[in-house]
Image (tube, rainbow, N blue to C red):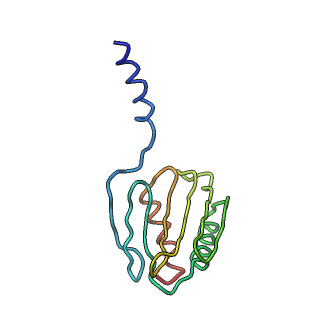
Amino acid sequence: MCTIFVSLALIAPIGCQSLPALRESRAWHGQTPIYATYRFGLLHTELPPGHSIEAVMATARSVLYRQGHIIEEASVSPQGGRLVALAPRQAPYDKIKITTSFEGGGIVLVINIDPAEENRARVVLESILEPLGI
C-alpha cells in the first residue's frame, strides 16, 4: 500500500507540467517556401543557401525586439548563433530561444518557445523569414 502512494506521488508532479508534444508535425513556411518540422518542443528548418548566420541572427533579434521582447542573450559567429529573448509581460510564454548553425549547404534554424508552443514558434519563424525575403 505504501509503495502505491509513493509511486503516485512521483508521477503526479510530472502530470502537472506542460510537456512538449511527442508527435511530429511538418508545414511549409515563407514565400520560397521552406519546410519546418516541430518535434519535442523545437521547430527545425533549413534555410536556403545565400544567407549568412549573421544576417539571420540580426533579423531575428530585430524582429523580436520590435515585438516587445527583451534580449537576454545574443551571440553570433560565422559557425552559429544563439539568441534568448524574454517575452513581453502580457505574453502567454516566458522566453524564446533561437539557435542557428551552418550544416551542409545551408543554415539550420531552431526555435524553442518556453513553455513549448508550436503555433507561436511557427509565427516567429514566419516573422523572421519575411524580412529575409524567404
- At 52% from the left and 52% from the top, the residue drawn is 114
Q: In what quadrant of the picture does the N terminus appear? A: top left
Q: In which quarter of the image is residue 46?
A: bottom left
Q: Position of residue 107 (x, y in %)?
A: 49, 76
How many marks the image carries: the answer is 0
- At 67% from the left and 58% from the top, the residue drawn is 72
7 or 117, nearer to the observer: 7
Is residue 42 found left or right of 59 in the rendered image?
A: left
Outermost bottom residue = 50
60 or 100, nearer to the observer: 100
Q: Where is residue 27 in the image (x, y as percent from the top left)?
A: 34, 69
Is residue 110 found left or right of 86 in the rendered image?
A: left
Is residue 39 found left or right of 52 in the rendered image?
A: left
- At 42% from the left and 24% from the top, the residue drawn is 9
Q: Where is residue 93 in the image (x, y as percent from the top left)?
A: 53, 51
65 or 7, nearer to the observer: 7
Q: Where is residue 63 in the image (x, y as percent from the top left)?
A: 59, 71
Q: In which quarter of the image is residue 68?
A: bottom right
- At 39% from the left and 69% from the top, the residue drawn is 36
